[in-house]
Image (cartoon, grey):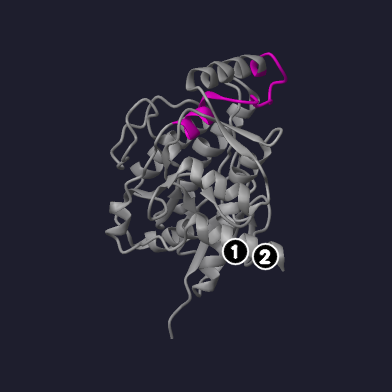
């Protein structure tokens, strides 16, 4: 009789981790959800990633999805908290894993934004970060890579349960107008189902870093129009000159530094960068392991529209 694998998923109460936990259970695994809150199914073991050591006893694989996200003001308590989770928490996690295979979910935000990103391979420089999120994810994944983990680098993860990417975009509509920085660009996005598939497959991959994204990149403006239409939002897209957007971001960051310690700027250089420059991930390396992205933005929007009508 074949023994069911036991997979520990950190951050399973969150967006990405919850999808990984459900996908693992659907594939026949026993799931142990490790984090401050229970996941959608399986056993729950409490872990405060900023302070304590996780318990992986009896598990065969660790998929690390827990992370502190956001765009905190430099020097703020929120930035220190992000370091505690994304870097110090990773060190504690790797110690607790004690030789078990680890799949560590990183981000394309680790890549240097000052370099050309028209086709980003895993060897792209990982410096010059515009915020604490990029810096701490890069530092955390460096620890994971040194320990022999598989590191996955998705970009702009979306899908059912997303509370960040598309909701934030929709919230930017003002007077039936959505301002986007600079001219139209090509962007890689990652369906959360594609990421979950990679997380489960990656246990058998060679240690190292792998980009994970949808099969083809998207034209920014066309994708945004599809999102607006699918959510019943009538708005026109206007292009804000990139120089103006960057000036506004610097002003917003300066204002946030003078405000409460945990406040995020209304606009940041990181946010402008994410929308204003072509960023296409080369997923050849992940594909060479047998993984293939199966979901697209159009699939998600079609499903969302259908659900809204029923």
- In this rendering, the answer to whether 160 lies above or below 270 is below
Work out whether residue 134 can be spotted. yes
Q: Which residue is mark 2?
A: 307
Secondary structure at badge 2 equals helix
Q: Write down the region rendered in magenta.
A: 256-276
- In this rendering, the answer to whether 162 lies above or below 115 is below
**Residue, x 69% and y 33% (percent of image)?**
174
Q: Which residue is mark 1?
A: 303
Out of 158 and 257, give the one closest to the viewer: 158
- In this rendering, the answer to whether 289 lies above or below 94 is below
Secondary structure at badge 1 equals helix
Whole-percent x and y of residue 266? Answer: 65, 26
| Mark 1–mark 2 distance (CA, rounded to whole Å) | 6 Å
**Residue, x 51% and y 36% (percent of image)?**
88
Whole-percent x and y of residue 104? Answer: 44, 49
Say whether marks 1 and 2 touch (CB < 8 Å): yes
**Residue, x 37% and y 30% (percent of image)?**
112
Quadrant assignment, res 122: top left
Binning the other alpha carbons within 10 Å of mark 2 as few (below 14), some (14 to 19) or many (20 upward) gives: few
* Quadrant location, the C terminus: bottom right
Whole-percent x and y of residue 32? Answer: 57, 63
Whole-percent x and y of residue 275? Answer: 49, 34
Q: Is residue 264 located in the magenta-colored stretch of the structure? A: yes
Residue occupying the far bottom of the picture: 1
**Residue, x 59% and y 35% (percent of image)?**
70
Label tally: 2
Left or right, 222 with respect to 227, comes to left
Out of 198 and 163, give the one closest to the viewer: 163
* Quadrant location, the N terminus: bottom left
């Amino acid at each position: 009789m074949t023994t069911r694998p036991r997979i520990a998923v950190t951050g399973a109460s969150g967006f990405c981790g919850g999808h990984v936990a459900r996908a693992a259970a659907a594939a026949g695994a026993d799931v142990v959800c490790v984090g401050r809150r229970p996941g959608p199914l399986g056993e729950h073991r409490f872990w405060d990633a900023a302070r304590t050591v996780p318990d992986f006893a009896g598990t065969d694989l660790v998929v690390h999805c827990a992370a502190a996200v956001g765009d905190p003001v430099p020097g703020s308590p929120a930035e220190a908290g992000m370091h505690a989770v994304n870097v110090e928490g990773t060190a504690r996690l790797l110690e607790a894993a004690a030789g078990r295979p680890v799949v560590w979910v990183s981000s394309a935000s680790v890549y240097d934004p000052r370099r050309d990103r028209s086709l980003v391979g895993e060897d792209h420089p990982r410096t010059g970060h515009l915020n604490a999120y990029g810096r701490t994810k890069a530092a955390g994944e460096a620890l994971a890579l040194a320990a022999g983990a598989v590191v996955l680098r998705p970009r702009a993860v979306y899908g059912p349960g997303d509370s960040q990417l598309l909701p934030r975009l929709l919230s930017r509509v003002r007077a039936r107008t959505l301002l986007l920085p600079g001219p139209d660009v090509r962007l890689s996005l990652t369906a959360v189902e594609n990421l979950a598939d990679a997380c489960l497959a990656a246990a058998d991959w060679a240690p190292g870093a792998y980009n994970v994204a949808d099969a083809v990149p998207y034209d920014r403006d066309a994708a945004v129009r599809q999102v607006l239409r699918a959510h019943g939002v009538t708005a026109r897209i206007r292009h804000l000159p990139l120089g103006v957007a960057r000036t506004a971001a610097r002003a917003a960051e300066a204002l946030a530094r003078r405000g409460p310690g945990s406040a995020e700027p209304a606009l940041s250089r990181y946010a402008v960068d994410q929308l204003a420059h072509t960023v296409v991930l080369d997923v050849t390396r992940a594909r060479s392991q047998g993984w293939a992205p199966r979901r697209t933005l159009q699939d998600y929007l079609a499903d969302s529209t259908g659900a809204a009508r029923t």
